[in-house]
Image (cartoon, helix red, strand yellow):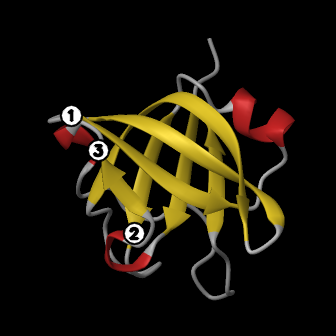
Amino acid sequence: MITTELHLYCKDYKFMRSLSDKIFTSGFWSFTLEEANSFIGCNVYFHNKLKESSYRGGQIIGVELKKYKNKERILFTIEENNENIGKPWYGDISIRQWYSIKHN
């Protein structure tokens, strides 16, 4: 079975909102709805810098299309998991990027 991990550059909890003790949202990501839906069930890791380990993470349990600055953007709903903290960025850190995807 192939699993997917999504690493996102998200400085200082920007656009994150707690819904409950272990559920939060993160937006406004520039994925298509089809791409975003393919991430449901995947682990996600949030990084302040590409060279730093993840500071927050969990499993994507929902996706919504939202308007942000007159553009369609993705809002993820995530079930927090402390095991997703401290993971290194996946991929090339020498280039500027806001996400990376790892297929295991």
Q: For this view, does 41 lie left or right of residue 66?
A: left
Query: Mark 1 Cα within 10 Å, few/some/many (few <14, many 20+)?
Result: few
Q: Where is residue 26 in the image (x, y as percent from the top left)?
A: 47, 53
- x and y percent of residue 9 in the render? 51, 71
Image coords of residue 95 (percent x, y)? 69, 86
Name the amino acid type tagged 3: Asn
Q: Distance between the residues labelled 3 and 2?
A: 11 Å
Element assignment for label 2: strand
> Marks 3 and 1: which is nearer the front?
1
Question: Where does the image place residue 20, in percent across and percent down from the top left?
Answer: 21, 35
Quadrant containing the C terminus in the rendered view: top right
Does 75 appear above or below 42? below
Residue at numbered disc 2: 47
* Above or below 20: residue 14: below
Circles 3, 2 touching at the beta carbon (< 8 Å):
no
Local crowd size for mark 2, using a 10 Å CA cut-off: few (<14), some (14–19), many (≥20): many
**Please, is residue 28 above or below residue 104 in the view?**
below
Q: Is residue 47 or residue 74 the one in the foreground?
A: 74
Taking the spot 61% from the left edge, 65% from the top edge, the residue there is 91
Q: Closer to the N terminus: mark 3 or mark 2?
A: 2
The secondary structure type at the circle numbered 1 is loop
Q: In what element is the residue under mark 3? A: helix
Which disc number belongs to residue 22?
Answer: 1
Residue designated by label 3 = 84
Question: What residue is rendered at 34% in x and 69% in y?
Answer: 13
- Pointers 3 and 1 in contact (C-beta within 8 Å): no
| Mark closer to the chain start, 3 or 1 | 1
Rounded to the nearest angstrom, the CA distance separating label 2 from label 1 is: 18 Å
Residue furthest top in the image: 1
